[in-house]
Image (tube, rainbow, N blue to C red):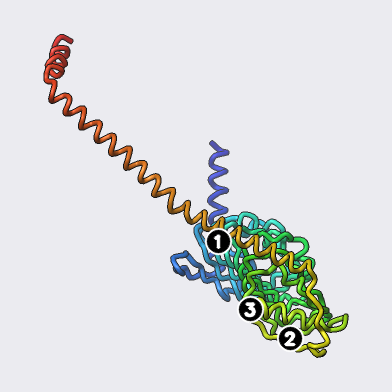
Amino acid sequence: MDVYIWIVTLCVSFASIETLSCKREGKCKISRIHSMKAADCHGKDMTQFTQCLGKDIEVVDLSFNRIRKLAKEDLTKYSNLKILYLNDNSIAAIDKQAFEGSDYLQTLDLSLNSLTKIPPVLFQLPSLQSLYLGQNLNMNIVDVVEKAKPIKSPLFHLDISYVMTEEPGELPDLGFMPTLEKYNISGNKLISMTTKHFAGLCSLKFLDTTNVSIEYEEDGCGCWTINRWLISRKVNFKPFVCHRKEAECLQDVPIDDFKVYEKCIGELKEELRKSKMKTILLIVVPIGAAVILAIVAYFFVRRRRKLKKKQKADPTQEIMLNNAVKKA
């Protein structure tokens, strides 16, 4: 009995501490955004990821706070998260397991922080469509991507703007990303750029190159090659200013880059086929189940009617049944 009382007292104490902590933290505004339960914790001067929200929360805005680290347990409670804004904090570290289990997360904004690296699991989340990493000024984005490859997240929008240090760096080779349509590389200083960096991005529609500078180490003809590649694939971008004449730069694109692009197209078609099949199954399976249920119900009702008709047609059965009951 004493142990039981001690456990109850301990639980009550923890609950009281959590309640006091939440009162000091200040309330987040709860609302509905596109039918999703949302919490606006913007600018609350928080230093840690809040634990004062319901488990069913789907959208959380924690931007403009003073969070410095994301620990493994910070997101465990919020497995239903779909949209998370953590921009403009002071985040310098994220535990490797912090986002494990965030299978429903679709949008993640980590821009304007102090990150030098991020856990590879971010590029493996099954629902992640938009990832913002811009203005983490000392991030080694090439190393981040190499550790995460092959990228499995169905990213539609990737922002790596202003992540290079003052020294020119490399643009990451993303590999195959057949779903990527928007790619922001603005504000970065690059050593070079080749068609290899875009060969696996066969759905690319918009490339933000604002304030991008490229210091080509070779003859500078890569500038024209990139322009031609992107223009021929109808990518919306601001063409790079090339210092050599186009007539002097008529080199062919490496055959391997064409092969990668064609493979990307093949993967995209396969993804679309799978998506269509899922949609068809979502429609066909319920309809099929309803039809089968209707057929079973029809034959059940029909059988009952036949039995009733048979009983009415043969009254001796009912008489014999009544006699048997009386004898019993």
Looking at the image, tell me whether mark 1 or mark 3 is earlier in sequence order. Answer: 1
Determine which of the numbered discs, if any, sits on residue 234 in the image: 3
Looking at the image, tell me whether mark 2 or mark 1 is earlier in sequence order. Answer: 1
Q: Judge depth for marks 2 and 1 and give the one in front.
A: 2
Circles 2 and 1: CB distance less than 8 Å?
Answer: no
Q: Is residue 86 visible?
A: no
307 w.r.t. 230: above or below: above
Residue at mark 1: 81
- Which amino acid type is shown beneath numbered disc 1? Leu
- Which amino acid type is shown beneath numbered disc 2? Phe
- Which amino acid type is shown beneath numbered disc 3? Lys
Q: Quadrant of residue 66?
A: bottom right
Which residue is found at the position 16% from the left and 24% from the top? 311
Alpha carbon distance from label 2 to label 1: 39 Å
Q: What kind of element bears circle 1?
A: loop
Q: Position of residue 262 (x, y in %)?
A: 69, 65
Q: Nearer the viewer, residue 45 or 111?
A: 111
143 w.r.t. 55: above or below: below
Which residue is found at the position 56% from the left and 57% from the top? 273
Alpha carbon distance from label 1 to label 3: 35 Å
Q: What kind of element bears circle 2?
A: loop
Q: Quadrant of residue 20?
A: bottom right
Residue at mark 2: 240
Q: Residue furthest top?
A: 327
Q: Position of residue 39 (x, y in %)?
A: 51, 68
Which residue is found at the position 14% from the left and 19% from the top? 318
Q: Is residue 163 left or right of residue 270?
A: right
